[in-house]
Amino acid sequence: MSTRLEKIEQVLNEKKAENIEIIDLTSKNYIVDYVVIATTLNPKHAFALLNYLKTDLKPFGEEFLRVDDNDEWTIIDLGDIFIHLISEKGREKYSIEEFLNELESKVQ
C-alpha cells in the first residue's frame, strides 16, 4: 500500500499539486483505507492531474473505479483509496481533513 501512496504523492508533487495530505483510515470504520487530498490551481490543472494519475499509475495496474468531477472538486475512487483534487476555495469550504479527523475521534 505504501508504494501505491508514494507513487500517487510523487505524481501530484511533480505536477504541482499543493498541500498534499495522506490520511490513514485503516483502523477506522470508513469506506476506504486511505484518503489523499491535494489542492489544485484551477479546473484545468485538476483535469490535467487526473490524466497524469491515470497515465502514470496504469503501468502499476491501478484501476480507476469511478471519477466524479466539477470545476471545484474531483474525486477519484481506487477502491481502497479516495483521491480528492480540490480547489483552494473548495478545500477551505468543505474542510475534508476536519471531517476525517472528527470521524477518527468519534470512532476511537
Image (cartoon, helix red, strand yellow):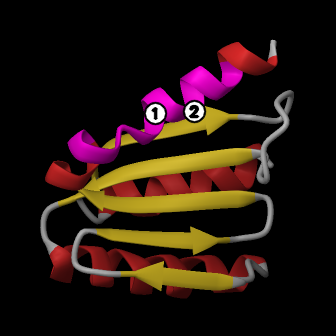
Query: Hey, what amino acid is under mark 2?
Result: Leu
Q: Is residue 51 left or right of residue 34?
A: left
Q: Is residue 92 above or below residue 73?
A: above
Determine the residue positioned at 49% across, 81% down. 68
Residue 55 located left or right of residue 92 = right
**Residue 63 coordinates in the image, percent (x, y):** 74, 82
In the depicted view, which residue is nearer to us: 82 or 30?
30
Compared with residue 48, is residue 107 higher up or lower down, i.e. above or below? Answer: above
In the picture, measured across the screen, residue 4 lies left or right of residue 71, that is right
Q: Residues within 10 Å of mark 2 (few under 14, many from 20)?
A: some
Label 1 crowding class (10 Å Cα cut-off): few <14, some 14-19, many 20+?
A: some
Q: Which residue is mark 1?
A: 97
Tell me if label 1 and label 2 are in contact, CB under 8 Å: yes
Please report the residue visible at 22 percent of the width from the left and 40 percent of the height from the top.
92
Look at the image and say whether residue 64 sits in the magenta stretch: no
Task: Give the secondary structure at mark 1.
Answer: helix
Q: How far across and down, in percent of the image, does residue 7 sit?
A: 59, 58
Q: Secondary structure at mark 2?
A: helix
| Front in this rendered view, residue 49 or 13 | 49
Q: Which stretch did the figure color magenta?
A: 92-104
47 and 70: which one is in front? 70
Residue at the (44%, 63%) spot, across then down? 11
Q: Which residue is mark 2?
A: 100
